[in-house]
Image (cartoon, coloured by chain):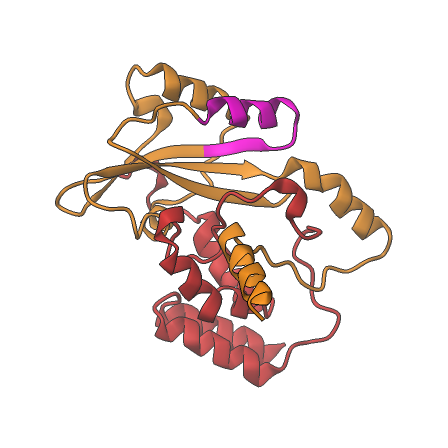
Chain colours: A orange, B red
């Protein structure tokens, strides 16, 4: 498999509103990413965490559409992972955990390996950190 | 309410341990993790700093399966990083011992 990203997206209230679906669907249809796992998480008012599989989420067209994007679902995120991933999720809030492969990068990876290259480092920098660095450089 | 995901290996937990073995633990612990934890707006995990936020796909570094670095990282440094992960509670004492033995045996 290619490298996989685990995104945890908080949304207001407790309803997944489906507004990310068009952008996500576009990436899936163009084979840029492949969604391999997903689930919903709710932090209860008492601080405990509920994991809700998409199939358990009840009749919601938005969640169904999200679940439909999953290709050959695997349980790659464990209950322990969920605790780590939602550590900052506030009581009374919910989040969607999306697990997707960076399918676009596989030909590049194969080309690197095929050329005899070796991966020396691979670091992912969040956009906010990049912005910080750019701002700091500009302030010099 | 965890159902089928209880007691299974998971991506995030395995990543934290693999990063130690490959000598890339500094990407998981330390300042990077602290910065990401502070970015609450991006809803990132504090402990699992390898769960990145939405990046533009074109901006990622070249990716490949985790491969050994060209030169072996310093053993003392690896053991120190291992100890730090244990101290932070990312590794249990038992997991620390297992990985330490692997490092000493390599």
On the image, the x and y values in percent for residue B54 come to 51, 43
Q: Quadrant of the N terminus of chain B?
A: top left
Residue B43 appears in the figure: no
Does residue A123 belong to the magenta stretch?
no
- Please report the residue visible at 48 percent of the width from the left and 47 percent of the height from the top: B53
Total residue callouts: 0
Q: In what quadrant of the picture does the C terminus of chain B appear?
A: bottom right
Q: Is residue A21 magenta?
A: yes
Q: Is residue A102 visible?
A: yes
Q: How far across and down, in percent of the image, does residue B44 sit?
A: 40, 51
Left/right of residue A75 with respect to residue A122 in the rendered view: left
Residue A134 at what x, y percent from top left?
Answer: 58, 60
Asked whether B18 or A137 is in front, the reply is A137
In the rendered image, the residue lying farthest to the left is A46
Q: Nearer the viewer, residue A46 or B94?
A: A46
B88 left or right of A115 in image: left
* Residue positioned 43% across, 63% down in the render: B35
In the rendered image, residue B17, in percent from the top left (x then y), is placed at 49, 62
Which residue is at a point 58% across and 23% down the rendered structure image? Answer: A26
Residue at figure coordinates x 56%, y 81% from the top left: B77
* The image quarter in which residue A12 lies: top left
- Name the one closer to the observer, B6 or A61: A61
Frontmost residue, A88 versus B4: A88
| Magenta residues, start to end | A20-37
User: Which residue is most to the right?
Assistant: A115
In terms of image quadrants, where is residue A8? top left
- In the image, is A128 to the left or to the right of B93? right
On the image, which quarter does residue A77 sit in?
top left
Q: Residue furthest front?
A: A139
Say above or below: A70 vs B44. above
Q: Is residue B40 above or below residue B4?
A: below
């Amino acid at each position: 498999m290619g490298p996989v990203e685990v995104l945890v997206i908080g949304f207001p209230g407790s309803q997944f509103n489906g507004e990310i679906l068009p952008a996500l669907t576009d990436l899936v249809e163009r084979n840029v990413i492949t969604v391999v796992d997903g689930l919903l998480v709710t932090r209860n008012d008492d601080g405990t965490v509920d994991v809700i599989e998409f199939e358990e989420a009840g009749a919601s067209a938005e969640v169904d559409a999200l679940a439909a994007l999953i290709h050959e679902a695997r349980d790659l995120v464990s209950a322990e992972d969920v605790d780590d991933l939602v550590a900052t999720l506030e009581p009374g809030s919910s989040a969607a955990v999306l697990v997707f492969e960076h399918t676009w990068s596989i030909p590049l990876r194969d080309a690197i390996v095929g050329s005899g290259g070796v991966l020396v480092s691979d670091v992912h920098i969040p956009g906010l950190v990049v912005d910080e660095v750019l701002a700091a450089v500009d302030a010099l | 309410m965890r159902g089928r995901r209880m007691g299974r290996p998971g991506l995030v937990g395995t990543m934290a341990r693999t990063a130690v073995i490959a000598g890339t633990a500094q990407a998981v612990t330390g300042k990077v993790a602290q910065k990401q934890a502070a970015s609450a707006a991006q809803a990132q995990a504090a402990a699992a700093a390898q769960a990145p936020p939405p990046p533009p796909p074109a901006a990622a570094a070249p990716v490949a399966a985790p491969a050994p670095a060209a030169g072996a990282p310093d053993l003392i440094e690896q053991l120190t990083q291992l100890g730090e992960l244990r101290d932070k509670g990312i590794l249990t004492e038992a997991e620390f011992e297992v990985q330490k033995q692997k490092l000493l045996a390599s």
